[in-house]
């Protein structure tokens, strides 16, 4: 007989538990720290030719960034105290590796050109050229950071890393490859 005053019981296969298994929770792929994922690309879901990448991921709650209003040094100190870290090894398809490489070379060349423009402006003592070089360099850096495919970390807790933006079909494929029925 069920007692209505008993404490609620969480089912062992519930997505709310951390049982050391890779799982999908909402729009996030939840991975235990230190996991090596199978050779299924997190970005494209493709299997086959590619490479494994090992990363030490860091995350801090969004409220930490309010400290930029006080001072960048205060923000840095608070971030270093509050951040959570976890290691993850994952597979990246060769198309993503090529895309990263070509973007890196392209924008690296653009940034070198902007630095040369900046230095030329300093040597010629022309404020307009210095300003154009500095603004163009910042724009190139921002575009490079936005265009490169990267993991979106929703959260890191004591045991798990929550990766946001992994398509549901890719989550399902990764889980099926890790835990075949």
Image: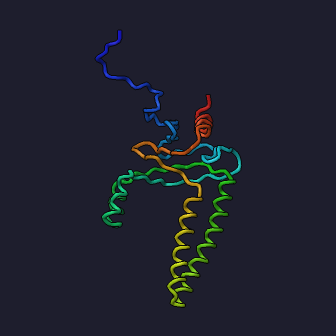
* Residue that protrudes farthest toward the left in the picture: 5
Residue 83 in the image, given as x and y percentages of width and height? 38, 54
Q: Nearer the viewer, residue 55 or 14?
A: 14
Image point (43%, 32%), residue name: 16
Horizontal arrangement in the rendering, residue 21 relative to residue 67 (left or right):
right
Above or below 122: residue 36 = above
* Residue that protrudes farthest toward the bottom in the picture: 124
Image point (31%, 22%), residue name: 7
For the C terminus, give its image quadrant.
Answer: top right
Residue 111 in the image, given as x and y percentages of width and height? 58, 73
Image point (47%, 32%), residue name: 15
Residue 65 in the image, given as x and y percentages of width and height? 37, 57
Above or below 148: residue 137 = below
Horizontal arrangement in the rendering, residue 55 relative to residue 60 (left or right):
right
Q: Nearer the viewer, residue 4 or 41?
A: 4
Residue 30 in the image, given as x and y percentages of width and height? 49, 40
Above or below 161: residue 109 = below
Image point (52%, 83%), residue name: 128
For the N terminus, give its image quadrant.
Answer: top left
* Residue that protrudes farthest toward the front in the picture: 128
């Amino acid at each position: 007989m069920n007692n209505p005053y008993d404490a609620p019981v969480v089912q062992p296969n519930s997505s709310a538990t951390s049982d050391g298994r890779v799982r999908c929770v909402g729009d996030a792929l939840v991975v235990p720290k230190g996991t090596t994922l199978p050779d299924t690309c997190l970005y494209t879901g493709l299997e086959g030719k590619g490479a494994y990448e090992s990363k030490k991921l860091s995350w801090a709650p969004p409220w930490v960034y309010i400290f930029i209003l006080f001072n960048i040094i205060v923000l840095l100190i608070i971030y270093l105290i509050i951040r959570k870290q976890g290691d993850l090894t994952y597979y990246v398809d060769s198309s993503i590796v090529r895309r990263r490489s070509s973007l890196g070379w392209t924008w690296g060349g653009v940034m070198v050109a902007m630095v040369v423009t900046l230095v030329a402006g300093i040597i010629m003592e022309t404020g307009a050229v210095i300003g154009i070089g500095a603004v163009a360099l910042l724009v190139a850096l921002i575009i490079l950071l936005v265009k490169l495919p990267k993991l979106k970390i929703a959260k890191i807790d004591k045991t798990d890393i929550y990766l946001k933006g992994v398509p549901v079909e890719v989550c399902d494929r990764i889980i099926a490859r890790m835990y075949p029925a």
